[in-house]
Amino acid sequence: MHYTAARQFYEREGRLTVPRKHVETVVLGDAEGEDRERREVSLKLGTWVGNQRTRAASLSPERLEQLSAIGMRWA
């Protein structure tokens, strides 16, 4: 879910430079054909992005590639 929030932020802002205290709201269950009700979830995206950078050495190659594709700066 955090990756979805990061991608949403990147698509809106054109970068993945997220302030540490930023909270991103993601809407769930709004796609056609879904049985779930639409709901909003607030995620501490700034903290999550910072943690991903800190833990880069332990992330899977797939996760590294996924985050790099949406503008993650590793250094």
Image (cartoon, rainbow, N blue to C red):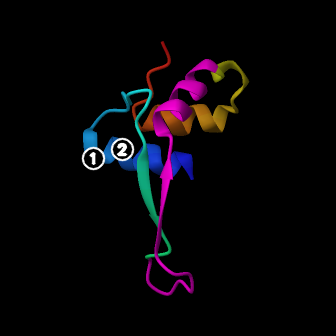
User: Which residue occupies 26% across, 40% down?
Assistant: 13
Q: Residue 56: give x, y in percent of width and height.
A: 63, 22
Q: Can residue 22 be found in the magenta stretch?
A: no
Q: Can residue 50 be found in the magenta stretch?
A: yes
Give the vertical position of 47 relative to 4 (above or below): above
SS of the residue under disc 2: helix
Q: Residues within 10 Å of mark 2 (few under 14, many from 20)?
A: many
The residue lying furthest to the top in this view is 75
Q: Amino acid at mark 2?
A: Phe
User: Which residue occupies 59% across, 28% down?
Assistant: 52
User: Which residue occupies 43% across, 76% down?
Assistant: 30
| Residue to which mark 1 is pinned | 12
Viewer-nearest residue: 13 or 37: 37
SS of the residue under disc 1: helix
In the rendered structure, are the residues bearing label 2 and label 1 in contact, judged by CB atoms less than 8 Å apart?
yes
Q: Amino acid at mark 1?
A: Arg
| Residue to which mark 2 is pinned | 9
Q: In the image, is 19 to the left or to the right of 57? A: left
Tell me which segment is drawn in magenta.
31-54
The number of numbered badges drawn on the structure is: 2
Q: Residue 4: give x, y in percent of width and height.
A: 49, 52
User: Which residue occupies 56% across, 22% down?
Assistant: 53
Give the vertical position of 65 relative to 27 (above or below): above
The residue lying furthest to the left in this view is 13
Q: Residues within 10 Å of mark 1 (few under 14, many from 20)?
A: few
